[in-house]
Amino acid sequence: MIKVLGFCASPRMGNSLYLLNKAMDEIKIHAGNLGEEVSVEICSVRGKKLSGCVMCQGCMKDGICIIKDDFKEMQDMWLNADVIIYSVPVYHMGMPAQMKAFIDRLGNSMFGRYKEIFPNMTTAPKPLKVVGCIAQGVHAFSGQEHTITQVINHAMICGCVPVAGDLWESYIGAGGWTSNDENRNALEEQYEDGTEDSRIVVTSSQSLARRALDIAILLKNGGINSRKVIDDPVYIAFRDNLQ
């Protein structure tokens, strides 16, 4: 089974959630066509308390952040997934503060989680999760590519595999805009009306989802059949999820 996590980084859960649901629906359809079993789960920052990392290094003991908020629940969902699709609204040409707080703390905690294997932080494990990003904003050219690049950097730092959808709509992820409409249902309404820009971002979100599932299947099958390679301790997190 491939475990898919849809991560909605929007505090509003409007246009970002709409695109994420389109992607998750496409994964279910694609999995059915391939004869693959998937589980799909949605995680959202909406209503969550997520404080920023204070670099206390408390998580270096055992991978558990000492700040008491909703991080642990979301961390567990992230660690359990094989595929993570982020759907991110553009704030100030980047990701929202809630998501940045989450990935800052997630990245640091990975060192402490596996400190017995890498005692001096010589490296961090490579869980090889497949990561894709959907980014949308109110305006065109207002930071969608910057936001997607932030997520790609996060994926690389965390030892994951970033993936894009199909050309021509998707180069490094799925990017769209609401044509200056701040309504939380703007993209859904525009897509139902048949506007071209909304079609492009929905199409790219769907192809991103399909390719993320494809790569996860290839990685999992490759891991099962390449035990000598994944015996390297750096792949312990990936190996654990093969069970």
Image (tube, grey):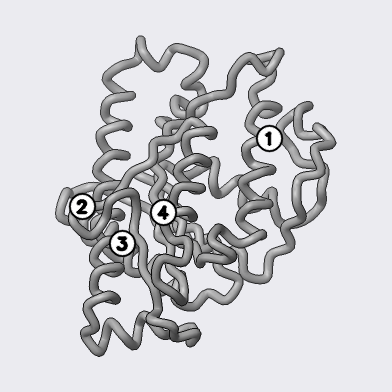
Q: Are dots 4 and 2 in contact, CB under 8 Å?
A: no
Describe residue 106's horizontal placement relative to residue 212 as left or right.
Answer: right
Residue 234 in the image: state x and y as whole percent. Answer: 50, 18
- Pick whichever of labels 1 and 2 is earlier in the sequence: 1
Q: Which residue position is annotated with label 2?
A: 166
Helix, strand or loop at mark 4 = strand
Please tell me which residue lies in front, 160 or 43. 160
Using the image, tell me which numbered label, if any, was put on residue 133.
4
Using the image, tell me which numbered label, if any, was put on residue 84.
none
- Pick whichever of labels 1 and 4 is earlier in the sequence: 1
CA distance separating discs 1 and 3 = 30 Å
- Pick whichever of labels 4 and 2 is earlier in the sequence: 4
Describe residue 196's horizontal placement relative to residue 5 as left or right.
Answer: left
Q: Which residue position is annotated with label 3?
A: 205
CA distance separating discs 1 and 2 = 33 Å
- Pick whichever of labels 1 and 3 is earlier in the sequence: 1
